[in-house]
Image (cartoon, helix red, strand yellow):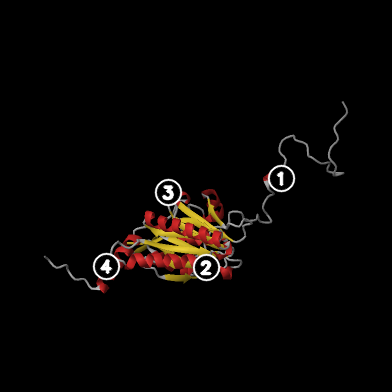
Amino acid sequence: MSMPFYVSPEQLMKDRADFARKGIARGRSLVAIQYADGVLFVTENPSQALHKVSEIYDRIAFAAVGRYNEFENLRIAGVRLADMRGYSYDRRDVTGRGLANAYAQTLGTIFSSGGEKPYEVEIFVAEVGASAEDDQIYRLTYEGRVGDEHGFAVMGGDAETVSSYLAEHYRDGGSLGEALAVAVAALGHATEGGQTTDRVIPVTDLEVAVLDRNRTQPRKFARIRPARIEELLGDRGPTQHAAPEPGPDAPSSAAPPRHAAPAEDDPADPTDQVSGDVPPLEDPDSGEPPIAPPL
């Protein structure tokens, strides 16, 4: 009878952690960012049916990266736990902290057990409060660790590069359009071959959702469709939102705004002029509408 090879517990945990970390890094990054009215989730997801961001309860959202079948099982388990707790006690007893603790126990048990492989997932559990100070974002790793994030958080893919970009450009208390623009630009900011490049992400490849405290419905979760995304991005739309901002030493040769007011010596707006033989709508002397002649 051959003896099995001995592997130290430290080496076993390290191998399992490396396995889960590599699986998570193969996916695309996901950004959770706080803005004035709630929490915004942005990720690159070409699929229109398989979502990375979903609703769990009235004020709670779930976002994940990694293996879809594994974090989908966790999402369904969270929905069932929230529904059961809200039905048995009160809807106010369902909190993001309670769900984060339940997820941490599940992920920690799976990671430490030697009978199955660890889950290749990382999770955000976010809850929107009555004010910006009450918003909560919890990040859960594959090994069951829980972190309380503030401002913004990134997981999956090249999270380090995206996080460094957000650290330079994120502004606390910004509007939804500002938060969306900086999040999309950060997702397009990638490092390839030791060089940092900015790529344009098509609007149709973005999955965007919010927890909006200003919604009148009890359920604060909402998805943002591509048409609304283009409207929020405005001039920083699908062809410009990934361009880096000019630095302090950049030349001041920027083009004037698209809707700049005309100069004082410019001619009047041609839409205000009447062409052809069309009579004016008002009498220039009395200022009253013209009277039709008798038949």
User: Can you say which quadrant of the picture contains the N terminus?
Assistant: bottom left
Instruction: Tell me the amino acid under the disc marked 2.
Output: Gln
Cα separation between marks 3 and 4: 32 Å
**Residues at discs 2 and 1 in contact (Cβ within 8 Å):** no
Mark 3 or mark 1: which comes first in sequence? 3
Residue situated in front as seen by the camera: 212 or 74: 74
Disc nearest the viewer among 3 and 1: 3
Instruction: Tell me the amino acid under the disc marked 3.
Output: Ser
Disc nearest the viewer among 2 and 3: 2
Camera sees residue 6: yes
Cα separation between marks 2 and 3: 28 Å
Mark 3 or mark 4: which comes first in sequence? 4
**Residues at discs 2 and 3 in contact (Cβ within 8 Å):** no
Instruction: Tell me the amino acid under the disc marked 1.
Output: Asp
- What residue is shown at x 53% (from left), y 53% (from top)? 223
- What residue is shown at x 40% (from left), y 59% (from top)? 65
Mark 2 or mark 1: which comes first in sequence? 2
Q: Which residue is mark 4?
A: 15
Is residue 16 found left or right of 253 in the rendered image?
A: left
Cα separation between marks 4 and 1: 74 Å
Q: Which residue is mark 3?
A: 47
